[in-house]
Amino acid sequence: MRRSILFFSLLSVLPLLQAQDSKPLEIIITGGLVPVSRDNVGTSTTLITRQQIEQRGYQFVADILQDVPGLSIARNGSAGTLSEIRLRGAESDQTLVLIDGIEANDPAFSSRFDFAHLLAESVERIEVLRGAQSALWGSDAIGGVINIITRSGKGLDDNQYSASAEFGSFSTNNGAVSTRGDSGSLHYALSIQRFETDGFSAADENVVDYTTAEGEIISTGGNSEDDGYENTTAHFKFGFDPTTQFSLDGVVRYTDFESDFDSFTTIPVDGLEDRADGNQQYYLLKAVYSQMGGALNHGLKFFRNESDTDFFSSFGKTDSEGEKNHYGYQLNYEWGDGAAQQGVSFVLETEQDKLASTFSGNRKVDNDSVVAEYRFNNDAFAAAANARYDDNDLFDNKSTWRLAGSWKYSANARIHASYGTGIKNPTLVELFGFTPDFSGNENLSPEQSKGGDIGIEYIAQNARHFFDITYYHREIEDLITGSGNTAVNIDGESNSKGVELTYELKASDVTSLRAAYTYNDTEDGDGNQLVRRPKHHFSAALDYAMLNKTLNLGINLRHVKDRVDTAFNSDFTTTAVELDDYTVVDFGARYRVNESVFVKARIENVFDEKYQEVLGYGTAERAYYLGLTGDF
């Protein structure tokens, strides 16, 4: 009943949303099996541009994503420590992360992606698609997809070179150099970035006491050891287009890191010997051959994702290696006239995940998939239907499907909606264990989901106002969670439902505002709120340009309310703890000295808010950064 009331309430406001002009056309690369115009995407999406990345000034992609509706971040302390992202209440291993088309989720990290090591220097734009995407992208995409697209040299008239340096609090040093170019048939982009910091204590320095529902006091904090971090990332991207019919693209990305961290027994405490040394490697080759004037396309794709991490602690050294290999063929065919266009795509792919660790031994899982998509769009309506069949050598074979549509109710308003099913296979870590304190469970069943969303989007005259309201709901059966020293499937249905609001205002050529609010109501099979998913998340960003647009100022605010986390007891049982609410404000400035040189400054946590994103782990106090960038 509540869903019906909300849906018809949304429809009732549509006649009021009338104007004449619409927002410029944008393409969402992950909108389907082929790139799709944003106006034709039924899925709720957020697009972050290079300009916005530069305005915000953050060095890590996780910080750039903080303002995305439906997205929450949980970090275990300072830079380089575990950083997980959850979409619409989904677990972090239920959101797929792509880097230039490479599936970056790590088989050695329980099929999650750790955002701790993803620097932003080479990033051109970010696409966030929320909601069921398993029928397109497979097991890791119940919550959605985050697509990281790096900078390219394609289309440049002249070679470009850039260099930047930044210094700041916690003895932080950050520097990068890059070059991009296009010689006609060959284009390339190369960047190298080095980040290092002394950091602060991952286990919180500030003493924070929590009271459980039973009246028990849990005390955290009081730690003092700084946890440093070093990261060197090199990224190379190229394309070769010898003819108009054939193209070859490739990516090589390498990250080497050293990260201090603090682990826990019942609560996090200083770990003088806790350290992780590792590297991440990503490789991609993709070839496309076109026929029939571009209407028929054949694509071959290979990518590899590797990780190798050594962990050091008072218990000694352990190691963990992960590897994902993917081979795929895709056929696309498009047809239609000016009034309507249609298209179909078929994909055959095979993928293998490997895990080798001190405690699990050598493990692997193979998965073969067939994927199909049908697309239709005209001036007012767009629709897509997807179906996927996965043949897995460890679990029952599964089929998933998805329907998505967009209806342009007027020149400036549209309804977008999607509904689909999904699966999340148990990870190699959940099946076979990872540490002496966490043994695997080979009897786990895959998680199964169903759900969708419906929303209204409005773009006012001259694109000065943009507004979107979306309602979503998802149910998951057989949710996998930690229990004692192993993993189990939870009985009953776990669900997540909520509302996302987005508003953008271009008040003038020099002033703009972005705001987002998410209400997210989650519960497990027993009716308990899922951990580290805030019920309320509000963010706002105000940008202002002055002095003939040579000086740009920005203020970012985020408020997080109503979260719970888990406290671990000595007997491996757990207790739910309600975390404190918090509000954080950041300030940034960027001054253009001339056409090539920019000075940038940033104050993070302006009001020195004390808070925890994860129980017992600290966050940064007020911090100052100053940098210089040159583009030539």
Image (cartoon, grey):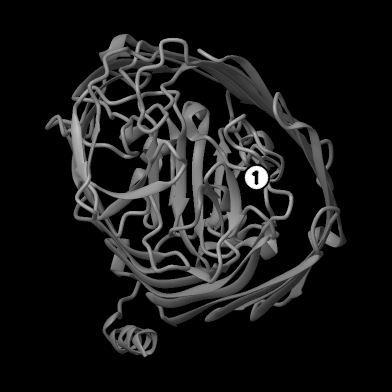
Question: Looking at the picture, does residue 1 appear above or below residue 311?
Answer: below
Whether residue 585 is visible here, answered yes or no, is no
Indicate the amino acid at tag 1. Answer: Glu
Q: Determine whether, in the image, residue 123 is placed left or right of residue 367.
A: left
Q: Determine whether, in the image, residue 227 is placed left or right of residue 377.
A: left
Snapshot quadrant of residue 569: top left
Which residue is painted at 43% across and 77% down in the image?
414
Residue 511 screen position, x and y as percent: 19, 47
Residue on which disc 1 sits: 430
Snapshot quadrant of residue 241: top right
User: Which residue is farthest front?
Assistant: 571
- Viewer-side residue, 267 vs 158: 267
Residue 187 screen position, x and y as percent: 69, 29
- Viewer-side residue, 428 vs 160: 428
- Viewer-side residue, 368 vs 564: 564
Q: Quadrant of the N terminus?
A: bottom left
Q: Determine whether, in the image, residue 304 is placed left or right of residue 598.
A: right
Question: Looking at the picture, does residue 614 appear above or below residue 191?
Answer: below
User: Pointer 1: residues within 10 angstroms few (<14), some, or many (20+)?
Assistant: many
Residue 629 screen position, x and y as percent: 37, 17
SS type, badge 1: helix
Count of marks placed on residues: 1
Which residue is painted at 51% across and 47% down in the image?
92
Whether residue 603 is visible here, answered yes or no, is yes
Question: Looking at the picture, does residue 92 appear above or below residue 9?
Answer: above
Residue 306 screen position, x and y as percent: 71, 29
Snapshot quadrant of residue 21: bottom left
